[in-house]
Amino acid sequence: MLIGRFYRGLGLLLGLILVAAAFVASVILGTTEIAWPTFFEALTHYDPSRVAHIILFTERLPRAVIATLVGASLAIAGALMQTITGNPLASPSILGINAGAMFFVVIAVSLLPLHTPADYVWAALLGALVAACLVVLLSRGRHGELAPLRVVLAGVAVTAMFVSFSQGLLIIDRQSFESVLYWLAGSVSGRELSQVVPLLPLFGGALLLCALLVRHANALLLGDDIVKGLGMRVGTIKLLLGLVVILLAGSSVALAGMIGFVGLIVPHMAREIFGVDHRWLLPACALLGAGLLLLADVASRFLMAPQDVPVGVMTALIGTPFFIHLARRKPA
Amino acid sequence: MTRPLTLTPSIDATVAAGRARYTSLLGLLGLVLLSSMGLSLSLGSFPTSFPEILHALATPQDSDIAFIVWELRLPRLLLAVLVGAALAVAGAILQGMVRNPLASPDVIGITSGAALAAVTFLALFGTTLSIHWLPAAALIGALFAALLLFLLAWKGGVAPSRLVLVGIGLSAAMGALTTLLIVISDDAVAMTAYVWLTGSLYAAQWQDVLGMLPWVLVAVPLCLAYARHIDAMALGDAVAQGLGVNLLRSRLVMVACSVALAGAAVAFAGGLSFVGLIAPHIASRLVGRGFARLVPAAALVGALIVLYADLLGRVAFLPKDLPAGIFVSGVGAPFFVFLLHRTRH
């Protein structure tokens, strides 16, 4: 673990460099490799008649931007969920938030003429909210406490419910096959930059709210009784942090479908390096999450080239051993 | 003349009354199942009356109706009953063992292991090998998943909660691989795989029924033989050990039974989820605690659930024949959420 402002600051700087490097790798690597000079050329003198420039602007750049945005958001959402529930296994994918958002998007897209993420992001947010409420409702014990195994099982049951609803919809309405599969598998490709921009205020708002609540989140680590003793309202803090989680996870699903395990692994990695203080933990989560998803996306292009593997599959394969490790470490 | 005043009825009388109530409940469930089977046989895209069905059942090689009844509806019906019963008992075993109402074969990854193997089979050999090998592939997948689960959850023993958590992780990984296979294979294979994953009894044949039967006949009596152990384990590990239960051996046998039942069910009918979760709950509301009492009731309830789900899919949306799995999860999932909410205290 890094101790002291200097070393932690240095750590964050290194993280930033990692993200920048992964971003550039994501833009230039792929089935059509784009040389360094072309990259800069396209940035400075965009020429719509050159194939490389078109690929860069319509495919690679949006893909890298989405991976950065979604990776960072999911990681922060995961860290906050782990703080709220006090459960190391909590994350948007395990607790069913992603599945809820996905199901509502699939319903909205198949019933209404909606085409861009900005059109249906409200459905994703609503779905995330519904799933979160369901899980909390189902996993509260006698005294309102969240029993660890129960939270996870309730999340898995809620996920199973939403996923099987989506599968049923898919079989009844075969037209939506492609789109449903896209949401289920999770993918950062196939979007344009202009579709991402309208969602930026949502991400920005969530991050701002999160920044305002950092000290309160730290207080939660001390236990509910101490928080009350400090004169803060536990319920309000958890509710507001939950709102941040829903905004981040819902918007991420609207952009990229169900991408699992980023929100689970990254907070643990970040905690190992930067400690539990949210002032350092959350920026570290953002950087590591973005880096992880960017690299997973780059790897997904080469795993079964020329076919793209959905990045959600990649993160699940990377994340599972980690999840099992955590499950084994947890005292039963 | 005055009768002697008794403050408490004798224990024998209470036990006898309870037993009579249980027997009559079970008998009632059995009757409902039988009449539902009759209903299911007489409904379908080709309308038949009940006397016609009885006639066709009596004279197998006679008419078109006999063909419809004997070759199309009856095997499908019997498979639905067997699969439902198997999934319900598999769920009851796991819930008893883990002492958690949320455990089921789909949660701990047995179903997803079978699904991964089945989809692999469809993607790699779908065009070259006969589809009859699919159940074998799925069963191997389920067994392999269970083996992996035990290996990964092993830490000087298998604590139930660790088993469940590791199962959830495994299930996620196998789900991801299944999605990967579906995404990279062409659309026709992908759709077949998807219908299979949802769970369907479409085109069930006698050989499927005969393939399913031995698993049920072996695993259900075996788990009943261990009923006392499960009841002891419900009181906690320490109590169970004090009562002379070999925890590890009992758990291994129970999980083996559960895997055999769930694996076989998934092999022949695809990934029908939620039956293993909700059937034991409904059954325990009807008959109360006690594993040996629970198993027959759960089996009957599970059979009824799958039977009606398949009947709905077959009849309600003619000419479409929708997979039973849609209805099982469509009704089962909300009902499960409701149950969970009711039983949380």
Image (spheres, coloured by chain):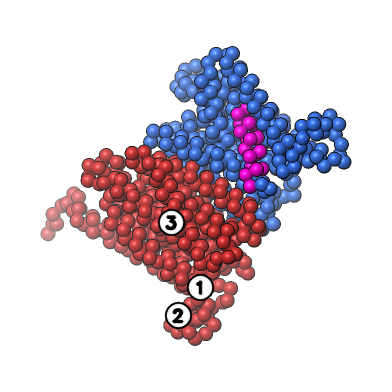
Chain colours: A blue, B red
- State how far apart marks 3 and 2 are (Cα): 30 Å
**Point 54% across, 59% down: residue:** B121
**Which numbered mark, 1 or 3, is in the foreground of this view?**
3
Asked if the stretch drawn in magenta spans residue A296, the answer is yes
**Which numbered mark, 3 or 2, is in the foreground of this view?**
3
Asked if the stretch drawn in magenta spans residue B199, the answer is no
Give the residue at the far bottom of this rendering. B62
* Residue A327, label in figure: none
**Point 49% across, 86% down: residue:** B62
Left or right relative to A51: residue A184: left
Is residue B260 visible to us here? yes
Mark 2 residue element = helix
Q: Look at mark 1 in the image and give the residue it sits on.
A: B73
Residues A231 and A103: in front is A103
Mark 3 residue element = helix
Mark 1 or mark 3: which comes first in sequence?
1
> Identity of the amino acid at label 3?
Ala
Q: Percent x, y for residue B212?
A: 42, 65
Point out the image quarter for the C terminus of chain A: top left
Range of the magenta residues? A286-304
Taking A228 as reference, is B277 above or below it?
below
**Point 63% across, 69% down: residue:** B319
* Residue B57, label in figure: 2
Identify the subunit bearing mark 3.
B
Task: Report which quarter residue B276 is drawn in.
Answer: bottom left
Identify the subunit bearing mark 1.
B
Q: Percent x, y for residue A56?
A: 78, 38
Identify the subunit bearing mark 2.
B
Q: Percent x, y for residue B80?
A: 47, 65
